[in-house]
Image (spheres, rainbow, N blue to C red):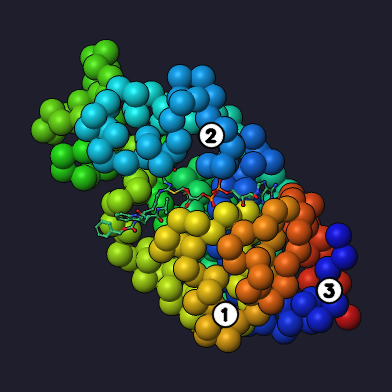
């Protein structure tokens, strides 16, 4: 993949860079994307049918066990070259914001410090009734386990479809989107809102917007630059080009 020279010049000159990542960044760490086919017990469901309050009310055990299965995958996952390149990129800029739709915590594990989790974190658990995070609970064999405070069912501390977005995180994301010179949209299908609206908002506010994805998305035709490749390949190359440009 050849990184356009004029993109490298603009990135090297930027003071504020904002990144939006989706499941495609974690694909090379072995964490399935939402577009990947579901397997096993959940093969007949789409994530949109499982990741909702309605699905949890209807079948809490099925939804809890789907998340348990994903938690076990995430617990074994390691940051891949895309995560590591993004961690290496952060110190180059006075203002670097990494907004992620992913719930796997791999950006923080890779070393990024300014990370905003728009959709929560699968390794955190909260009470379905009270909405408060619960760090530990008695294993009574109940599936899902019960909240030690109110006895209600526990659930993953992620944002489900048709649930309101976390206000503080959304404010941070929108502000970082509106106040950057370069916006990188990496490994997202750009179909889930309001996150999917951020690349267009960055464009509207005058940023150079780069899409990094081996496939087309609804945003591809609007992007200033499209680097059509795997994040694990493209991101290390982008970091190398930035490093060389800053040295010259
Ligand atoms: C909201 C956490 C309003 C959970 C996720 C009716 C009522 C209310 C809202 C709606 C409604 N109808 C529609 C909506 C809006 C809805 C929405 O957008 N629905 C979609 C399906 C149309 N949005 C919401 O509901 C949001 N809330 O709008 O609130 C509101 C206000 C008040 C009161 C109530 C409501 C909440 C959305 C959050 C959902 N939670 N995740 C969990 O993880 O289980 S979303 C989940 O899917 C991800 O977090 C991500 O955000 C999203 C999309 O996934 P991507 O990350 O893009 O991954 P995907 O698999 O799709 O694509 C992977 C991409 O990577 C592909 O393009 C592929 O080509 C690429 N790729 C693959 N390999 C690589 C690669 N790229 C680079 N390198 C590689 N190697």
User: 10 Å neighbourhood of mark 3: few (<14), some, or many (≥20)?
Assistant: few
The mark nearer the N terminus, 2 or 3, is 3
Rendering coords of residue 244 (x, y %): 86, 72
x and y percentages locating residue 149 in the rendered image = 13, 33
Q: Which residue is mark 3?
A: 4
Q: Please report the residue visible at 69 percent of the width from the left and 76 percent of the height from the top.
A: 224
| Tag 3 secondary structure | loop
Q: Determine whether the residue tagged by mark 1 lies in a helix, strand or loop.
A: helix
Q: Residues within 10 Å of mark 1 (few under 14, many from 20)?
A: many
**Residue 131, numbered label:** none
Please tell me whether residue 152 is drawn above or below residue 208 in the rendered image. Answer: above
Front-most of 188 and 20? 188
The residue under the point 27% across, 33% down is 56
Location of residue 80 in the rendering, given as x and y in whole percent from the top left corner: 69, 44
Task: Specify few, some or many for label 2: CA neighbours under 10 Å numbering under 14, 14-19, or 20 or more.
Answer: many
**Residue at image mark 1:** 203
Q: Is residue 134 visible?
A: no
Q: Nearer the viewer, mark 2 or mark 3?
A: 3
């Amino acid at each position: 993949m050849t990184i356009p020279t004029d993109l490298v010049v603009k990135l090297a000159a930027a003071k504020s860079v904002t990144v939006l990542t989706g499941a495609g960044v974690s694909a090379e760490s072995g964490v399935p994307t939402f577009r990947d086919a579901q397997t096993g017990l959940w093969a007949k469901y789409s994530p949109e049918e499982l990741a909702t309050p309605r699905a949890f009310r209807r079948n809490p055990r099925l939804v809890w066990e789907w998340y348990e299965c994903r938690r076990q995958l995430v617990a074994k996952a390691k940051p891949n070259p895309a995560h590591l390149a993004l961690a290496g990129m952060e110190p180059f800029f006075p203002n670097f914001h990494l907004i992620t739709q992913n719930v796997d915590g791999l950006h923080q594990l890779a070393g990024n410090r300014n990370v905003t989790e728009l959709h929560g974190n699968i390794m955190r658990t909260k009470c379905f009734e009270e909405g408060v995070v619960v760090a530990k609970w008695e294993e009574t064999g109940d599936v899902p386990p019960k909240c030690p405070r109110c006895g209600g069912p526990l659930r993953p501390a992620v944002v489900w479809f048709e649930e309101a977005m976390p206000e503080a995180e959304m404010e941070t994301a929108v502000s970082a989107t509106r106040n950057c010179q370069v916006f990188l949209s990496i490994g997202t299908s750009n179909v889930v809102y309001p996150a999917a609206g951020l690349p267009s908002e960055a464009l509207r506010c005058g940023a150079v917007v780069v899409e990094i994805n081996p496939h087309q998305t609804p945003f591809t035709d609007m992007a200033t630059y499209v680097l059509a490749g795997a994040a694990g390949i493209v991101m290390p190359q982008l970091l190398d080009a930035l490093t060389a440009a800053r040295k010259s």
